[in-house]
């Protein structure tokens, strides 16, 4: 399929969606209202996006999305490797996180094409900036393409990690940097820098699995990303075997720094009134790396079998629950420890505690749009948490046989 064909599909999808909506109005039958969120701390609008993501309802997210995905398929994005999956998976999931966060269309589409011209981090040029920019602009819109291209030609690492994260704020006059190829000056406005920070939050949250910590020798190296290309005593372990130990990555404390910097610029008209991401206490939280590490290790001690919280009786489950509570106290910004805690409490018949843990876990999962423990995908964590929440609310005892446990799964 040619790029022109993909673009025609894009336009046809928009027309078809508009037709279906018009048909629904003309028939006189009101659409069924979407189900209310399972907990009242999740806004209904966000829950509508969650359900669209879970159901792969691409047109509900963006009328052009089916055709844009076809363009990525045509260029082989699904055949390229990216950190804990394929490049296409990363692009789609980054887009989905931004969509869940209520970001403007241009930024969401940037998420879908963000490294497509290659950039200062990776060589994944599935589009040629020298000749394909008009094609991409016609597909995703001129504003989204211009921002996508700009972020592919600036030194993102030094802007984000050496500059904005360290300063904790966005400079009011913007920032001028060198083009990574031509060395010409490139100016980024405060609004573009805010977009860059919010996008980077989604980008890191989606891709940062435990292998990153192993290949960059973190936290022993002292920096989440080592500087420079040469191998040193600390900071570069290029032979680290992929996928590694599959522990959750130590990224949350660093994304919190980006969130606080993003919050330093208001959502003015130039960024479409975009809200701040609904994570990290509305982008105000501070999380110390040492606390994050301790929380991760407590969680792993339960889920990787160092502490048996499943079949060894109440004492073992009590130890596991205590560790999970401590993990949540140290890092209260991710849902997985609470999801696992809910199951522990259900097994002990503590329905109230299990319900509270599952409800808060669900709120956190529905805020991130991507998993922290990437051994399971976000949709799986969300579904399992809903199973636990429903069982706790119904005061149903935990299954007493393996067959009964694997029979679980239905969510209403």
Image (cartoon, grey):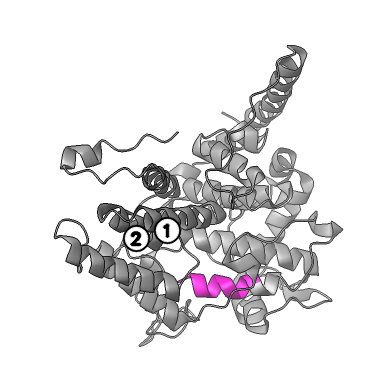
SS of the residue under disc 1: helix
Determine whether 67 is above or below 112 in the image. above
Q: Is residue 163 left or right of residue 309?
A: right
Q: Which residue is labeled 2 in the image?
A: 341
Place residue 372 in its image quadrant. bottom left
Does the rendering let one see residue 82? no
Q: Nearer the viewer, residue 36 or 162?
A: 36
Residue 357: assigned label: 1
In contact (CB < 8 Å): disc 1 and disc 2: yes
Q: Decide: few, some or many residues near mark 1? Use Cα within 10 Å; few <14, some 14-19, many ≥20.
A: many
Marks 1/2: CA–CA distance? 7 Å
Residue 298 shown in magenta: no
Q: In the image, is 44 to the left or to the right of 391?
A: right
Outermost left residue: 312
Which residues, given as a range, are shown in magenta? 250-259
User: From the image, which quarter does the N terminus lie in?
Assistant: top right
Would residue 252 be counted in the magenta stretch? Answer: yes
Identity of the residue drawn at 39% across and 82% down: 231
Res 321 quadrant in image = bottom left
């Amino acid at each position: 399929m040619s790029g022109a064909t993909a673009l025609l599909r894009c336009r046809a999808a928009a027309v078809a969606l508009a037709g279906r909506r018009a048909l629904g109005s003309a028939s006189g039958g009101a659409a069924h209202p979407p189900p209310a969120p399972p907990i009242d701390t999740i806004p209904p609008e966000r829950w509508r996006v969650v359900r669209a993501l879970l159901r792969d309802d691409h047109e509900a997210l963006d009328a052009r999305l089916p055709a844009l995905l076809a363009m990525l398929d045509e260029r082989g994005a699904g055949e390229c490797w990216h950190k804990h999956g394929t490049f296409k998976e990363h692009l789609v999931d980054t887009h989905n996180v931004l969509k869940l966060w209520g970001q403007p269309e241009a930024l969401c589409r940037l998420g879908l094409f963000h490294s497509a011209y290659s950039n200062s981090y990776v060589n994944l040029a599935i589009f040629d900036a020298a000749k394909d920019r008009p094609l991409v602009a016609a597909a995703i819109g001129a504003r989204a393409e211009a921002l996508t291209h700009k972020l592919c030609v600036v030194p993102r690492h030094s802007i984000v990690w050496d500059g904005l994260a360290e300063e904790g704020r966005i400079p009011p006059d913007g920032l001028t940097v060198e083009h990574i190829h031509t060395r010409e000056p490139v100016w980024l406005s405060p609004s573009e820098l805010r977009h860059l920070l919010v996008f980077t939050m989604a980008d890191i949250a989606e891709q940062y699995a435990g292998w990153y910590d192993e290949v960059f020798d973190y936290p022993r190296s002292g920096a989440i990303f080592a500087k420079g290309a040469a191998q040193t005593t600390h900071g570069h372990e290029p032979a680290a075997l992929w996928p590694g130990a599959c522990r959750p990555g130590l990224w949350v404390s660093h994304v919190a720094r980006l969130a606080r910097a993003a919050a330093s610029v208001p959502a003015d008209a130039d960024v479409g009134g975009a809200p701040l991401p609904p994570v990290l206490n509305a982008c105000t939280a501070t999380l110390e790396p040492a606390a994050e590490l301790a929380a991760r290790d407590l969680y792993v001690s339960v889920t990787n079998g160092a502490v048996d919280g499943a079949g060894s009786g109440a004492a073992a489950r009590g130890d596991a629950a205590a560790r999970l509570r401590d993990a949540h106290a140290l890092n209260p910004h991710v849902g997985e420890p609470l999801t696992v805690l809910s199951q522990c409490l259900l097994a002990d018949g503590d329905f109230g505690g299990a319900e509270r843990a599952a409800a808060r876990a669900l709120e956190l999962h529905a805020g991130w749009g991507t998993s922290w423990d990437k051994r399971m995908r976000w949709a799986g964590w969300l579904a399992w948490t809903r199973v636990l929440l429903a069982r706790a609310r119904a005061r149903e005892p935990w299954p007493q046989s393996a067959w009964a446990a694997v029979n679980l799964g239905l969510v209403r």
